[in-house]
Image: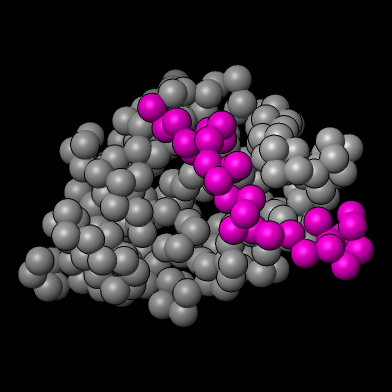
Amino acid sequence: TIRGGAPDQQVEFVMARRVVLWDFDGTLAQRPGMWGIELAAAAAEVIPGHVLDLEALRPYLAEGFPWHEPERPHPELCEPEAWWAHVLERLKDGLVRMGYDGGVAREIALASRPRFLDPTPYRVYPEVVPTLEQMTAEGWEHVVLSNHVPELPTMAEALGLSKHFRAVLSSGNLGYEKPHPEIFRLALEAAGNPEECWMVGDSPVADVEGAEGVGIPAVLVRRESVEAKRRAPDLAGAYEIITGRVGL
């Protein structure tokens, strides 16, 4: 604890000692079908009875989004409306390239936004809250660090997760995507520049390579990868690795 200010106005700044950075999608919670289902539902809303061929659309959405070029900062997209304007325009362009009328494509893109922001489809993995509570009781603090929409903090709140975290950070607000080194620097800053810090996520590149590239040890969860030094089936397994209860 560091004390600052005049003697009659003492302020305490508590420095975090041990922190875990957690990815969100695929690590803390899962959304069945991910975003494709919501885009298909938006298409059916605009064109009643229409079935959007997501596999046919996929190649047209393989570039142009912030997460496709994580090496490039995007500070101009840190405001939610700017971020969504960019992303929805890319969605519209993809639909047009697939053959949709421009006006219809724009309607579908706009209709997808509230569906993407609906936290209802998410399911928090069963071991998440018990693991967070156990680690908190042992003196660990937690920060969400995710490539996600700007409204992720609100979504985490709706899922009952916010109370477990010191901060909920999204690339949509930070101007950087994992595995860019700067997003990890910002996360460490938000975490209080802890003495010990770990990253846990389900992406071998964005989470594991990104974190370890800046000296943060990482645990890959829910996926296999021969490149990942530390792997665990879930958060309970990650906890055991982080706290030294099991070997690697």
Camera-nearest residue between 96 and 217: 96
At x 59%, y 67%, the residue is 33
- Residue 83 part of the magenta-drawn span: no
Q: Does residue 90 appear in this view?
A: yes
At x 39%, y 54%, the residue is 22
Whole-percent x and y of residue 149?
Answer: 61, 44
Q: Quadrant of residue 131?
A: bottom left
At x 8%, y 69%, the residue is 247
Whole-percent x and y of residue 70?
Answer: 42, 32
103 relative to 182 in the view: left or right: right
Whole-percent x and y of residue 242?
Answer: 20, 62
Vertical comparison of 111 with 138: above or below: above
Q: Does residue 185 appear in this view?
A: no
125 relative to 121 in the view: left or right: left
- Residue 50 part of the magenta-drawn span: yes
At x 87%, y 43%, the residue is 104
Colouring chosen for the image of the structure: one colour
Q: The N terminus lies in which quarter of the figure? A: top left
Camera-nearest residue between 132 and 177: 177
Residue range corresponding to the magenta coloring: 43-71
Camera-nearest residue between 126 and 105: 105
Q: Quadrant of residue 123?
A: bottom right
Vertical comparison of 232 with 22: above or below: below
Residue farthest to the left, as pictured:
247
Camera-nearest residue between 182 and 113: 113
